[in-house]
Image (cartoon, rainbow, N blue to C red):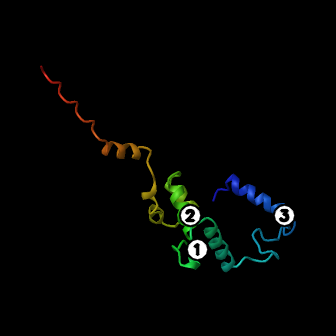
Amino acid sequence: MPLIDQAAKALDGLSQREAFTAPDDLVFCTEVGEHVTDDTMRDGFYDALDRAGLGDKRDGDDPIVFHDLRHTFGTRMIAKADIRRVQEWMGHADIQTTMRYLHYAPHAEDAALVAEAFRLEAPAEPAAAVD
């Protein structure tokens, strides 16, 4: 997975924190430097969804789940990168798995084609009256 500038900056910020910066310390850890549990990670995810106004699965809203982040990545990347790169980044052994994302790839000419298909013809000018 390529490391984008925003992620590198965030990781660099973690290296500037007051504690847990030794080579053997965890990068992502609890307040006491221990492993983050699945439940803690999920709770943070649902809290973020709630703050963003996207619902909270714990309250019975639409079930956005943590794994949806992976699908969002695949969907966004297939529109920008070739399928082999996306396959590699997502770790798919079979290209058929990656191909599920292909129907999301927009094409630059799509909007023009739809506009043309639904273009209304200008009404014909009425014939001039002959006196």
Please tell me whether residue 85 is drawn above or below residue 51 in the rendered image: above
Residue 12 in view here:
yes
* Horizontal and vertical percent position of residue 119: 31, 42
Amino acid marked by disc 2: Met
Name the residue that disc number 2 marks. 90
Asked if residue 99 lies left or right of residue 42, the reply is: left
Q: Say which residue appears at 53% left-offset and 52% top-offset.
A: 81
Quarter-of-image position of residue 58? bottom right
* Horizontal and vertical percent position of residue 88: 56, 60
Name the residue that disc number 3 marks. 17
Of callouts 2 and 3, the N-terminal one: 3
Of callouts 3 and 1, the N-terminal one: 3
Residues at marks 3 and 1 touching, judged by CB atoms closer than 8 Å: no
Residues at marks 2 and 3 touching, judged by CB atoms closer than 8 Å: no
Which one is in front in this view, the residue at disc 3 or the one at disc 1? 1
Please tell me whether residue 96 is drawn above or below residue 6 in the rendered image: below
Please tell me whether residue 49 is drawn above or below residue 122 in the rendered image: below
Q: Say which residue appears at 41% left-offset and 43% top-offset.
A: 109
Name the residue that disc number 1 marks. 56
